Amino acid sequence: MTTRIIARIAKRNLWLALVAGGLALPGGFLAAQEEVGIKRGVAAPVVQLEDLDGNPVDLGELIGTTPILLEFWANWCENCEALAPSMERAHREFGDRVEFFAVAVGVGQKPRNVKRHLEGHPASYEFLYDRRGDAVRAYSAPTTSYVVIVDAAGRVAYTGVGRSQDIETAVRQVLQP
């Protein structure tokens, strides 16, 4: 094996270890209210993603026009599964005022795997696919179950990670004038 392939495998394994075991920091997972990833208050990055059929989705068409919630998600992520009921409740309550998206990361899954997962675990909000990791890099996603809420002005208003996030309260706070 070449050094390049070994380095790529090591990087992938580190990512998987961080995701599976939580962030390797004292105390385990960061509390949901702690700021992680992209800084709050900054302009939300514009990225191109795909829907699960491979069609382009430009978040730039939405940013600055309506609040957006992005959950960096994977079908193998136990924290994402635990967060799903909170996401569903928040979508039911605020889905008419906030665009909800699960951003399926391109680590260990393909769109067909995500579709198959959704057949057994349907969700009421849209799933997008981050094939090249553009959104992961742009939003500095440290792990899956990472949630970013962008306000109507296009600024990052909330970041959190893990299963204990109170998504409904976070969205409510972003919607308050």
Image (tube, rainbow, N blue to C red):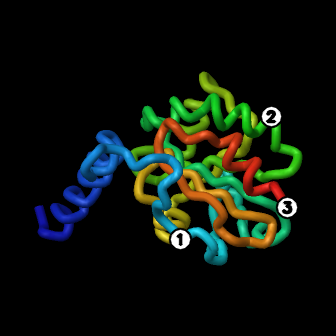
User: Percent from the top left, x then y, of residue 86?
Assistant: 64, 33
Q: CA distance from mark 2 to mark 1?
A: 27 Å
Q: Do the CB atoms of the residues marked 2 and 1 lie less than 8 Å apart?
A: no
Q: CA distance from mark 2 to mark 3?
A: 21 Å
Horizontal side of 100 relative to 25 (left or right) equals right
Residue in the picture at 66% in, 63% down: 157
Residue in the picture at 80% in, 34% down: 92
Tag of residue 92: 2
Closest to the observer, 93 or 57:
93
Q: Which is more foreground, mark 2 or mark 1?
A: 1
When asked about the image quadrant of residue 114, the answer is: top right
Q: Upstream in the sequence, badge 2 or badge 1?
A: 1
Residue in the picture at 61% in, 25% down: 121
Q: Secondary structure at mark 3?
A: loop
Q: Secondary structure at mark 2?
A: helix
Q: Name the amino acid, label 3.
A: Pro
Horizontal side of 11 relative to 173 (left or right) equals left
Res 110 seen here: no
Residue count near mark 3 (Cα–Cα under 10 Å), binned few <14, some 14–19, many ≥20: few
Closest to the observer, 124 or 96:
96
Q: Upstream in the sequence, badge 2 or badge 3?
A: 2
Asked if residue 60 is positioned above or below residue 172 in the image, the reply reads below
Q: Residue furthest bottom?
A: 43
Q: Residue furthest top?
A: 120
Q: Name the amino acid, label 2.
A: Arg
Report which residue position mark 1 lands on.
Answer: 39
Report which residue position mark 3 lands on.
Answer: 177
Q: Upstream in the sequence, badge 1 or badge 3?
A: 1
